[in-house]
Amino acid sequence: MNKMYCNDDLLEIRAGILHIGVGNFHRAHQQFYTHMLLHEKDQQSWGICGVCLLPSDEKIVNNLRAQDLKYSLTVCGRNGKNEVHKIYSLCELIWGVEDPDAVVRKIADDSIKIITLTITEGGYNLDKETGEFILDDEKIKYDLENPASPTTVFGFIAEGLRNRKVKNGGGITILSCDNLQHNGDTAKRAFTAFIEAQDKDLAAWVKENVTFPNSMVDRITPATTPEDIERLNKMNGTNDKAPVYCEDFAQWVIEDCFMAGRPAWERVGVEFTDDVTAFENMKLSLLNASHSLLSYPSFLMGYRKVDQAMENKDLVQFIRNFMDIDITPFVPVPKNTDLENYKETLIERFANHSVSDQVSRLCSDGVSKFPVYIIPNLGKMIKEGKDLTRLAFLIASYRHYLKYKTDDHGNTFEVSEPWLTINDELLIANENPLDFLELSAFKGVHLKTTEQFTDLYIRFVQDIRNSGIDWVLQSIIK
């Protein structure tokens, strides 16, 4: 059995952080760091109150409540040795569907000093082309007109801050933990736009009393399937309804700009800085972009686990060429970072058999991921006349994945793309492959009118259709 790290004496934990979006990544990353810190007596006012806002969260809420909000986290070593932590840092849990007023009261509570978020890359409701907050969304319009009965994360935070302002609850920090470049700036743009449209007095208060630090987060955390739950419980000697597992690598870099204090996370390995730009650019451009590069081709080749896909030497070479040739010229290296070692570690992390991430997870929500992970560097590559082969192949693979929903072996599948627009659906259905290049995910660049790109892309679309992904990949590697 794996070694279990826990402490049953942590009885004085109080919530100083409210977190919205109690998913697996949050429970393997922020909760892990905070749990490790709460073993120190002077930090036990920094427990986390989790908040779930979606009807689909009912299962995780019920499972966590059934075990007093405790759960096991299995950290899977690349050397095959695992550590199991019994996580105690989640000290409260509110389900907004069940008790929306409790969410508002907790945000207004002066004991809460930080609101953290994992609401997904697409959850900030920003137009992919202009970057502006989408005020005419139906749910947003409802919340703007009905501030006392919010339904979205924006409405809940606005109402909570309004109550906080009225009761003189003091300033607060909103800290995004989503995989977005300048995620704090993104959060600030989204929440201040909503609040400005709803309540100008509150907007003025927010300007003076709320900070939005940028942060960079990194830890591969697969979705937990029913089979995983059975496997983890058997392996660890536990009976956990909501276990999580993750890799042994973790990184968290945060701009040190907190309005009302913060935990001493630096004691457990978090790095604080004045500017996270170099760190987040390296991570998003190399790790996340490489995940996207791997996802659609490997899925269409029939792979369903990332570590299994990494046993294919052509896929590994494809990723290394992407990192070395396409991306490294555009990645400023953070201080004290060995970029070659970082890239080699990424390959090791992807191949970690103990984590065995699902390729389908990497494929999901491409419409939100492409603008963040792929398009910024693709735009630079086009401008500088770089080789576009690998990214043209990626986008041709993405079209095939969305349009035909069948892999090279004839297996059909469902796609998970919650942010596709009606126009996106029409572009996917269109038989002219050039029209696909107008998908909302690609609005940051003019792919359709870039001849250097379209020549490669059209060729790959046809070759994938006629000869399959594997054949096309081999032609690129040679």
Image (tube, rainbow, N blue to C red):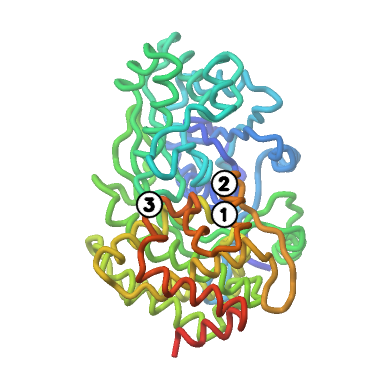
Q: CA distance from mark 2 to mark 3?
A: 17 Å
Who is closer to the viewer here, 122 or 251? 122
Q: Tags 1 and 2 in contact by the CB under 8 Å rule?
A: yes
Q: Measured from the top left, where is residue 235 in percent x and y?
A: 71, 66
Amino acid type assigned to the residue bearing label 2 in the image? Asn
> What residue appears at the point 30 percent right and 66 percent down from the top-left corner?
381
Q: CA distance from mark 3 to mark 1?
A: 17 Å
Who is closer to the viewer here, 256 or 33? 256
N-terminal-most mark, 3 or 1: 1
Task: Characterize the local packing of mark 1: few (<14), some (14-19) or many (20 or more) Cα atoms within 10 angstroms.
Answer: many
State the residue lying farthest toward the front. 432
Where is mark 1, residue-wise?
427
Q: CA distance from mark 1 to mark 2?
A: 6 Å
- Helix, strand or loop at disc 3? loop
Amino acid type assigned to the residue bearing label 1 in the image? Leu
**Side of 332 where 88 appears, left or right:** right
Where is mark 3, residue-wise?
444
Q: Quadrant of residue 382?
A: bottom left
Q: Measured from the top left, where is residue 228 in percent x and y?
A: 72, 62
**Side of 185 where 140 appears, left or right:** right
The mark found on residue 423 in the picture is 2
Q: Quadrant of residue 222?
A: bottom right
Q: Measured from the top left, where is residue 322 in percent x and y?
A: 39, 74
Look at discs 2 and 3 and give the one toward the viewer. Answer: 2
Whether residue 407 is visible here, answered yes or no, is yes
Look at discs 3 and 1 and give the one toward the viewer. Answer: 1
- Figure check: 146 above or below 378: above
Amino acid type assigned to the residue bearing label 3 in the image? Gly
> What residue appears at the point 58 percent right and 13 percent down from the top-left corner?
148
> What residue appears at the point 46 percent right and 23 percent down from the top-left corner?
111
Position of the C terminus by quadrant: bottom left
> What residue appears at the point 39 percent right and 26 percent down from the top-left corner?
192
